Amino acid sequence: MRKITGGVTAAKGFAAAHTAAGIKYKDREDMAMIYSAVPAKTAGTFTTNVVKAAPVKWDQMIVRESDYAQAVVVNAGIANACTGEEGMGYCRQTAETAAQALQIPESAVLVASTGVIGMQLPMDRIRSGITVMASDLSEELSAGNAAAKAIMTTDTHEKEAAVTFEIAGVTVTVGGMCKGSGMIHPNMCTMLSFVTTDLAIEKELLQEALFEVVKDTYNMISVDGDTSTNDTCLILANGMAGNPVITEKNADYDKFVEALFEVNRSLAKMMAGDGEGATALFEVVVEHAASKADAVKLSKSVVTSSLTKAAIYGHDANWGRILCALGYAGVEFDPEQVDLYFESVNGRIQIIENGVALPYSEEEATRILTADAVTAICDMKQGDASATAWGCDLTYDYVKINADYRS
């Protein structure tokens, strides 16, 4: 497997476009389109929030009932959530417009929205944007990058990743883009993620692979403890790489899962590190837990602790907050066995051993914690299971951003 430059247009047969439709933002692009030259198998995972946005319901229907998809239309600025039957009607109108412009079935169009909850979409602008994008589609990597920028809300930068790998002498590519900065919390988060691949694979296996990967990537990130109404992760596989179709879980399937995991982990970490107001990516690694479930609970408990996140912002090695967060995770363990380390590009330091502080250098700890990415390693000494969660520090700017988000 090899990391390459690109996003949703890295794989064969995929094109993208973007436009400034003026949906909410007045000074930037706010719509994107992804298009496959041929019908693509599709799979998806969606928010666990009971309150689901209209685009989520639409996409769940398309993924469940359609044999294939060929296009995705995305808008930023308005979430089309809590909009009733009118909002569902707008999803259908979006699909109808795209289907006419691209000469594909309405049932092959997926839709996604992100932004303010409760507002209705300006459909005249949506329709105009679709018409513009349909004529501007390009397979260039730059088109994928521009699309990644167009779907941002409070994100500070675009997020994309791509890899290649070999199956039966054929090069297969997996690429993706996402947006997400706030209202992010497992399971799934305020994220829109779109993955494309030229792999040939059966629909059921594509869905299984996505489920398998999501649980250790997007479901392991948190910025603020809020699970969104719009979380969507979609994957389209158009088979244009020309590999023998994957019809069972074998070595080729495993290669694909590994590549899919790498792309989605990269995107997940980008979202966590770009949390609203954040200055650092905060990674929590739990080692030697009694079970995988315990490791997941423990790592999530630490990465979501507001006090710990604030300490990371202050470059303060306040290890008591981490031990406390481990303690209320709902997992039985011996606190007098726990070791804790901090690590970054600036070095590694052990803070506690067997639940007790070591005579470490506060200055050295602070230097390690001033990096753009910081890792806390918790060795539970209970078993062989491990898990990694990602989040960010908690800053003054998080409150500022969310205090006037609708204005």
Image (tube, rainbow, N blue to C red):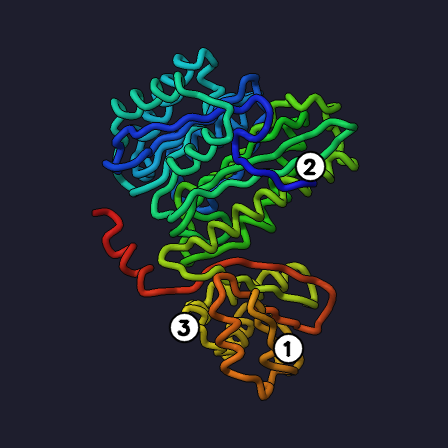
Q: How many marks?
A: 3
Residue furthest bottom in the image: 359
Q: Is residue 13 above or below residue 299?
A: above
Sort mark 2 into few (<14), some (14-19) or many (20+) by Cα contacts within 10 Å: many
How far apart are the alpha carbons under marks 3 and 1? 24 Å
Judge left or right: residue 5 versus residue 232.
right
Quarter of the image containing the N terminus? top right
Are dots 2 and 1 in contact, CB under 8 Å?
A: no
How far apart are the alpha carbons under marks 3 and 2? 40 Å
Camera-near label (3 vs 2) is 3
Camera-near label (2 vs 1) is 2
Residue furthest left in the image: 407
Sort mark 3 into few (<14), some (14-19) or many (20+) by Cα contacts within 10 Å: some
Residue 178: x percent and y percent?
A: 47, 41
User: Which residue is painted at 34% across and 48% down in the image?
Assistant: 154
Residue type (three-letter) at the residue carrying disc 2: Phe
Label 3 vs 2, first from the N-terminus: 2
Judge left or right: residue 52 versus residue 289.
left
Residue 392: x percent and y percent?
A: 45, 60
- What residue is shown with label 3? 314
- What residue is shown with label 1? 338
Are dots 3 and 2 in contact, CB under 8 Å?
A: no
Helix, strand or loop status at disc 1: loop
Camera-near label (3 vs 1) is 3
Residue type (three-letter) at the residue carrying disc 3: Gly
**Residue 256, numbered label:** 2
User: Which residue is painted at 52% across and 32% down in the image?
Assistant: 8
